[in-house]
Amino acid sequence: MKCPRCDSNKIEVIATSPVGNVWEVYECMDCFYSWRSTETPNIHEKFKLTKEQIDNLPVIPPVPPLDK
Ligand SMILES: [Zn+2]
């Protein structure tokens, strides 16, 4: 299985349906995209991510320096 947003194969099951065994929720460990097993997510080209883009994403809000 591959992440629909960044194509990573580091996918983990983060939840299963509380009633019955109907669905699971998967999460990508690289970009934190998550989706349910019953969906077939289709990510628009504009919203896809590469490893380089993830590494260069701005942090919001910025982390202030530690006090000395
Ligand atoms: Zn991903």
Image (cartoon, grey):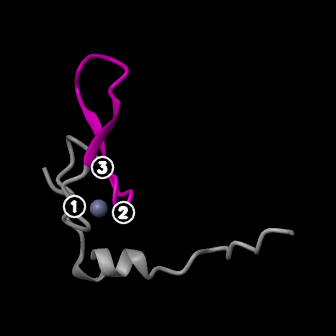
Residue positioned 53% across, 81% down in the render: 58
Q: Which mark is residue 31?
A: 2
The amino acid pointed to by label 1 is Ser
- Label 3 sits on a secondary structure element that is strand
Residue positioned 25% across, 68% down in the render: 6
Q: Is residue 18 above or below residue 67?
A: above
- Which residue is more in the foreground, 41 or 50? 50
Name the quadrant of the C terminus. Answer: bottom right
- Which residue is more in the foreground, 12 or 44? 12
Disc 1 or disc 3, which is closer to the eye?
1
Q: Are marks 2 and 1 in contact (CB under 8 Å)?
A: yes
Residue positioned 58% across, 75% down in the render: 59
Q: Quadrant of residue 52?
A: bottom left
- Which residue is more in the foreground, 48 or 21? 48
Side of 54 where 6 appears, left or right: left
Residue positioned 36% across, 63% down in the render: 31
Q: Which mark is residue 64?
A: none
Q: Is residue 33 above or below residue 45?
A: above
The amino acid pointed to by label 2 is Cys
Q: Is residue 45 above or below residue 43?
A: below
The amino acid pointed to by label 3 is Trp
User: How crowded is the residue under tag 1: few (<14 C-alpha within 10 Å), some, or many (20+)?
Assistant: some
User: How crowded is the residue under tag 3: few (<14 C-alpha within 10 Å), some, or many (20+)?
Assistant: some
Q: Are marks 2 and 3 in contact (CB under 8 Å)?
A: no
Residue, disc 3: 35
Q: Which stretch appears magenta?
A: 11-34
Tell me, yes or no, whether the highlighted magenta stretch contains residue 32: yes
Q: Which mark is residue 8?
A: 1
Q: CA gap, disc 2 to disc 3? A: 12 Å
Q: Quadrant of residue 45?
A: bottom left
